């Protein structure tokens, strides 16, 4: 049976509640594979750079030093009563979604998706994109260089571990299976999460990970 067909059957089983949420490691880490190109890298970098000054202002308002933030993102969030991203920060990021790159053949064949599927970074919502990133990783908005470096260490690196996460969402009768793709770079301890949506992959978030990242989240439930 093809990988695509196996994953499709798993999606249907999760949607129909014959399976609970599933995390499948579909490809182990590799070594020596050539990096992929990220044509939209400069656009993403400019977007983060355009937000940085306003983000620094917001950090100082809550008595945080933007150049010396707590390492734990949960500690940073405690300083903000409202987790919603200020509109003046969001407005600095391009209104039109950025096509960062295309899905490479290794990820496509491992996940049952089509090669050359566009990978998109948008303003998004509470579940993906810049809005979701702000809710969870405000520190990256203070340091555009770090944000781009971490993105490149996952999305550019074709040697990453590849994981497919399947989860039922929606109300009874209108439920569907949400498919997440996780790229995990264990050597650099970095991850990147994307979600399949309308014939594209939407970037959800990316950040550093600890050595135990994924130990429980990727197991069958």
Image (cartoon, grey):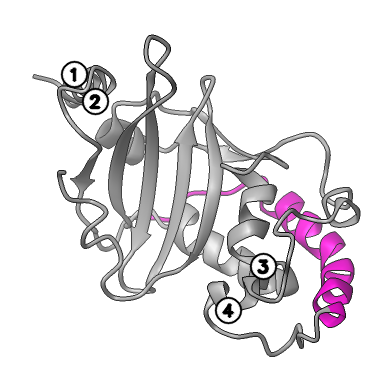
- Residue 198 x, y percent position in the rendering: 54, 20
Q: Which of these two is toward me, 79 or 130?
A: 79
Q: Main secondary structure of the magenta part?
A: helix
The residue most toward the left is 1
Residue 138, disc = 3
Q: Secondary structure at mark 4?
A: helix
- For disc 4, the marked residue is 75
Looking at the image, tell me whether mark 1 or mark 3 is earlier in sequence order.
1
Q: Are marks 4 and 1 in contact (CB under 8 Å)?
A: no
Name the disc covering residue 9, or none: 1
Q: Quadrant of the C terminus?
A: top left
**Is 197 inside the magenta-drawn segment?**
no
Per the image, label 3 sits on a secondary structure element best described as helix
Look at the numbered disc 1 and give the secondary structure of its residue: helix
User: Upstream in the sequence, badge 3 or badge 2?
Assistant: 2
For marks 4 and 3, give the CA distance.
11 Å
N-term-proximal mark, 4 vs 3: 4
């Amino acid at each position: 049976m093809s990988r695509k067909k196996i994953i499709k059957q798993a999606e249907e089983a999760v949607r129909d509640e014959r399976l609970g949420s599933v995390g499948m490691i579909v490809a182990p880490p590799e070594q020596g594979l050539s990096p992929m190109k990220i044509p939209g890298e400069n656009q993403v970098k400019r977007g983060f750079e355009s937000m940085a000054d306003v983000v620094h202002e917001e950090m100082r308002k809550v008595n945080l030093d933007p150049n010396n933030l707590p390492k734990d993102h949960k500690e940073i969030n405690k300083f903000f009563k409202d987790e919603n991203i200020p509109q003046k920060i969001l407005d600095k990021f391009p209104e039109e979604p950025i096509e960062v790159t295309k899905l490479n053949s290794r990820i496509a064949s491992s996940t049952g998706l089509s090669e050359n599927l566009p990978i998109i970074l948008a303003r998004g919502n509470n579940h993906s994109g810049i809005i979701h990133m702000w809710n969870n990783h405000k520190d990256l908005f203070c340091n555009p260089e770090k944000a781009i470096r971490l993105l490149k260490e996952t999305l550019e690196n074709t040697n990453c571990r590849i994981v497919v996460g399947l989860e039922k969402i929606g109300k009874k009768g209108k439920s569907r299976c949400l498919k997440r793709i996780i790229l995990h770079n264990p050597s650099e301890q970095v991850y990147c999460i994307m979600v399949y949506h309308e014939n594209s992959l939407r970037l959800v978030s990316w950040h550093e990970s600890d050595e135990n990242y994924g130990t429980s989240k990727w197991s069958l439930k």
